[in-house]
Each structure stands twice: as C-alpha cells, then as structure tokens.
Amino acid sequence: MLAGVSVDYVTRLEQGRAAHPSAQVVESLARALRVSPAERAHLFELAGLAAPGAETVPTHVTPSVERLLDRLSGTPVAVYDASWTLVVANQPYAALMGDPTGLRGNDRNAVWRNLLGRGSRVRHTPESRRAFEAALVCDLRSAAARYPADSRLRALVAELYANSARFAELWDAGAVGHHESARKTVEHPQVGPLTLDCDVLTVAGSDLRIMVYTAEPDTADAERLAMLTVLGTQTLATTAG
C-alpha cells in the first residue's frame, strides 16, 4: 500500500516471477521500505537498473521527509517530485482528494491530470483555472530546464504538447515559475465543500514538493476535515487531487 504496488505484483517479485520491475516500482519499494542510500543503490542493481542520477528528477523520499509525514499523520499531506508527479500521499490526503493508490503512469502527474485527465476535486472559476494551469506549466518548464536528460520528463512534455492546445500555448509562451501556496475550495462528495489553505514546501537538496492542506481552527471547514480524517477512504471515490 505504501509503495502503490499491488499485492499480486509484490508477490510475483518475491517469488521471482516478475523479472524486470521498472525503475518507478523499484523506487517506490525503496521508499516504502525506508532503505538507506546504499541499500537503495543495491536494490536498483539487483533489478538490473542504474540508480537515478543527478540528471533525472529526484523521487527518493529522504528519511527526514518520512519522519515529517509520520508527524503529520492527522493532516492531508502529499509529496510530489519536481515534475509534479505524485510520489506518496498519506491517508488524510487520500480521504480529502481521492485515493491515488490505483493511479498509474501520467495519471499520477498533476499537470497531465489537470490538462488532459479528469482534473481534481478543487473548485475553480474560469480565471483561477487559467492561472492554475499557467502556474503548473511554468513550474514544469523550470523542471525541464533543470533535468534536460530525464527521458520520462521529456516524454511527459511531448505528450502534453501534442494533445493539449492549452499546454502548447502556455509552453510556447516561454514563461518559467513555480506553483505556489494558495487557498483552495475542495468539493468533497461526502462532506461537501471545504475551504483550506494549501501550502507547498520545497525540500532543499531533493527538489521534492510537500503539499499540506490545513483548515482555519474552530470553523466548519476544520470540523469537516476532522471528520474526513476519521472516516478515511472507506466510502470515498478514487479520484486523485
């Protein structure tokens, strides 16, 4: 569950029936097992893969970030890489934005999901939608400039450019920037709308983004968020945010 890998596939790996796991799967397992950097490199070697280097988008969640997630177990928190691909999300985040464990490939990328996919539970006006899309594309352009050798990032940009006129328009504009903190209203199918502060923190040295949702104390939004934390994802639809 922590790695976002099915029980069946983990079983086949353990039994030696799945001989060629992808780099994404190996990275996910290393993160879930909280291995050391040396053990992570060895895990990639066992899988017949080269451990990602400095030229690729980092996806390794450091022990300090893992500890931070543990301490924020009652707060919706998700970790994204520099390309805005979801790396890991805790249970409160899954309850708020939809369980992401079944998402694969570009479905886990926020830029792709908002420009080509199903979007998210965040409510937008036409103006805020355009500003949000521009911020995401600007941030992705910055990441592409930092990691020009990352083949997955290049493929993501190529697919977006070929299939989204809005992305192509924004990309050709040439702007760079960052998707920053904002106040968002989440339309939840069970508890209704929640207006929350969404803070985006960047992890120095690993280029990860930690997205944290909090509610103003002693408000109806705080009560709804607390209710979601208790309910978990048992009856919630699986639409990632």
Image (cartoon, rainbow, N blue to C red):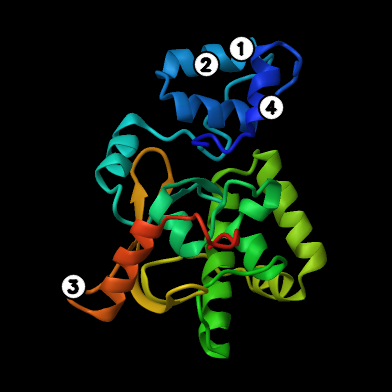
Amino acid type for the residue under numbered disc 2: Ala
* Disc marking residue 9: 4
Residue 218 point in image, percent of width and height = 17, 76
Amino acid at the residue labelled 1: Glu
Q: In the rendered structure, which disc, 4 or 2, sits on the residue that comes first in sequence?
A: 4
Give me the C-alpha separation between circle 3 and circle 2. Answer: 44 Å
Is tag 3's residue or tag 4's residue first in the polypeptide sequence? 4
Where does label 3 land, which residue? 217
Taking the image as shown, residue 37 lies to the left or right of residue 148, namely left
Between residue 103 and residue 236, name the one nearer to us.
Answer: 236
How far, Cα to Cα, is label 1 from label 3?
A: 48 Å
Task: Give how far across and how far down residue 124 sits, in percent.
Answer: 52, 83
**Amino acid type, callout 4:** Tyr
Residue neighbourhood size for the residue with mark 4, other residues' Cα within 10 Å, grouped as few (<14), some (14–19), many (≥20): some
**The residue under label 3 is which amino acid type?**
Pro
- Residue occupied by mark 2: 41
